[in-house]
Structure formats: C-alpha cells, structure tokens
Image: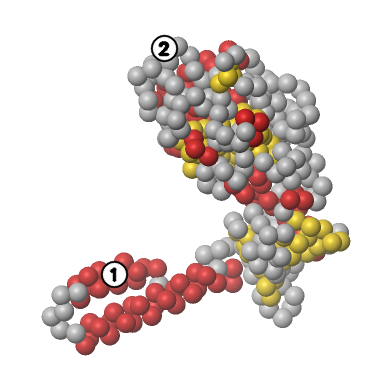
Amino acid sequence: MVQLNSHGEVADFLDVSQFIGGRSAYECVAYSAALLKYAGQPGHGPAGTTMQASNLAQYWYGREEGSNLTSNTNGMSLDAEYDMLKGLGLTYRPLGANINAVIGALLGGCPVLFCGAETGMHDMALGDRVPYSWSPSGNHAIVISGVASDGNLLVHDCASIAPGGVRPGPRTYDANKLQPVSATAIIPAWLSEDDMSIDIHSPGVGNYFAEPDTQHWTCKSNGKVLQFGVLDFYKQQGGLQRLGLPVSNEIPLDANGNTRQHFERGVVFYDPQHVYDRPPGAGNVYYAHVYQGPAWDAATKDLNTQIGTLIQELQQAQASTQNNPALAALKQVAAIVEPFK
C-alpha cells in the first residue's frame, strides 16, 4: 500500500515562495524541483529547510538559464528541466500532458512536477479561482502531491502568495480545470519502481474502477473489464500509472485462450506458454511489442489501409491525367505517406 501523510499526500513538502528581491520571478520549475528534492517520507517531515530549497532553486535556474537576476524571464524548457532533475539526483518518468497519468503516478506513490497554463490553476479554497496577483497568461509549474477526497488534486505552488507570504499547502486545485503542458513523475528514494502495486482500496482507485468480485474490475468510464491474470498483473504493476485505463476488453489471440488487452499507454498479452514472445523474466502476462505482431493497434491498421487506398488513387490519377497542375502536389503527398504504409 502507498504511504500517505495526514493530508493525503505521497510525501511531506516545504512551503517556499519563489519570489526574492533582485532575482528572476520565472523560476517556478526550479523551485518545484527543489521542493521535490527536499520532500520527505510521509509522516517524517521534509528533508531540508526553506532556505536550502530556495538556494537550490536559485542555483539551478542560474545554471540552466545563464542568470537568476530579475532581467532573466526565460522560464525553463523541458530539456532544461530534465537536465536539472538528473543533476539533483532525482529519478523521474515523463508522463506527457495527461491528467490521468498524473493521477496514476500519485496512486503509485509518486509526486509530480506539473507544468500547465496559469489560467488553469484554480484554488478551491479561494473560491475556485486562480490564486495569482497578476493576470494569468503564461505557463506555470507546481508540485502535485496527492489526490483529494473529492477527486481534485493536492498541490504546492511556490507562486501562490498571500499578504503574509506563501499560502501553506497542500492547496486543493480543481482537477477539471488544469491545462497540462507537461508532467513528470518523481520516484521517491523510499519507493522502488517495483513497489507500486495497487488494489481497489488504494487512494483514488475506486474513482476509476468498481470491483464486483475479487477477480474482476470494471472501468467506470467505459465499462471495460480487467479480469483474472491480467487484473493481477495490472495491480502488481501499478497499472494506473504505467498503463492507464483499459480501452478494450481481452481480445483472443488464438483458440488456445491466449489474449491481448489494450490500454491508454500500452498492450499486454495473457500468454502463459509464451507462444508470442518471451521477454526476460516474464510470467503469464507481459508487456507486448506494439509496433509488430498481433499487438499492432487496430486503429493503426485502419490508417494503413486508408493510406494504401490513397496511394492507389494517386497512382491512378497519375496514369490517367496529363499536364494536370495539381499532379505535382499529389505526387508530393504520395511521397510523404508512402513510408507509413
């Protein structure tokens, strides 16, 4: 089971303001990373001080962006963020711009460095409004630290400043209004990658699945079913983070009971005899190759068929049409799509 603190967070965090006189006001990514660096095991308190976190953020912003002075309004690119996380010694996993992936990471015990539009950061305790003193227009980075009991997200925001200083966290931000640009899960030192198992009672899992019996889960959003060996594999792997929600039921691979099942972020095979693949250490269920063999996505096959039809039509047009001014453009299209056939 994932450890949580008394607030329902996956780690204990400092509250730090990113605004220091004479220094850049665009250091949100660096400050969020510093919070993550000094995050403590739930119930044990943060692993550093406010001053340490601020100094660390100032150092890394200056290192990645050339200066931490007021005149530097660069912000930080995603590549610079990853370089900084490596330099901080943090183990991370990119999640893309996907709120479900963020929630999956949290349910697996991993806090998230989240970047999104300022206009999407809505603090529920402030009347579901943006907490900033300026008119929001750009992007901003925060730490997402847990799933609230109402399904919204617990966060620490170094730019949420009240007259007395940074608003203490965790704050609760409206999950439905967040506008993600990128998200990166940070795997805490006390949590190994193999220790991410979940069950129906794990925080937030019941928001996505119903458990009619111990061998079946039903996805609440689309009715797809996880069952038996695939369900066991999904739970052991912390499936909400690694695979996301199911987008199909099990699909037969053959007449011998072997099946495949598609998820938002991958495909798994139930194949006890390893007829289709034999990954090192694989059990009855394993991750499938998605660009070859029977796991090849049906939607991709349909697209390939459409591309093939288009190429045939272009070839026919080329054979039957002379001196057509549009023919050169059509040939260019054919050249572009041919490699994807």
- Looking at the picture, does residue 183 appear above or below residue 75? below
x then y, percent, for residue 22: 41, 12
Identify the image's colour scheme: rainbow, by chain, secondary structure or one colour. secondary structure
x and y percent of residue 240 in the render? 68, 51
Q: Nearer the viewer, residue 296 or 320?
A: 320
Q: Residue 34: percent from the left, percent from the top?
A: 56, 24
| Quadrant showing the N terminus | top right
Residue drawn at (65%, 22%) of the image: 168
Residue at coordinates 23% horizontally, 82% vertically from top-left? 318
Compare marks 1 and 2 and give the one earlier in the sequence. 2
Compared to residue 310, the image places residue 141 above or below, namely above
Q: Secondary structure at mark 2?
A: loop
Give left or right: position of 247 versus 140: right
Where is 131 relative to 317, above or below?
Answer: above
- How packed mark 2 is, by other alpha carbons closer than 10 Å (few <14, some 14-19, many 20 or more), is few
Task: Name the mark nearer the viewer: 1 or 2.
Answer: 2
Quadrant in the rendering for residue 33: top right
Give neighbour class at mark 1: few <14, some 14-19, many 20+ (Cα, 10 Å): some
**Is residue 186 in sight in this rendering?**
no
Which amino acid type corresponds to the residue marked 1 in the rendered image?
Val
Tell me the element at label 1. Answer: helix
| Residue holding disc 2 | 22
| Residue that extends furthest to the left in the rendered view of this protein | 323
| Quadrant in which the C terminus appears | bottom left
- Residue type for callout 2: Gly
| Number of callouts | 2
Task: Estimate the x, y position of residue 156 in percent, counting from the top left.
Answer: 62, 28
Left of 87 or right of it: where is 199?
right
122 and 212: which is toward the camera: 122
The dot on residue 333 is 1
Residue drawn where x is 55% and y is 68% of the image: 297
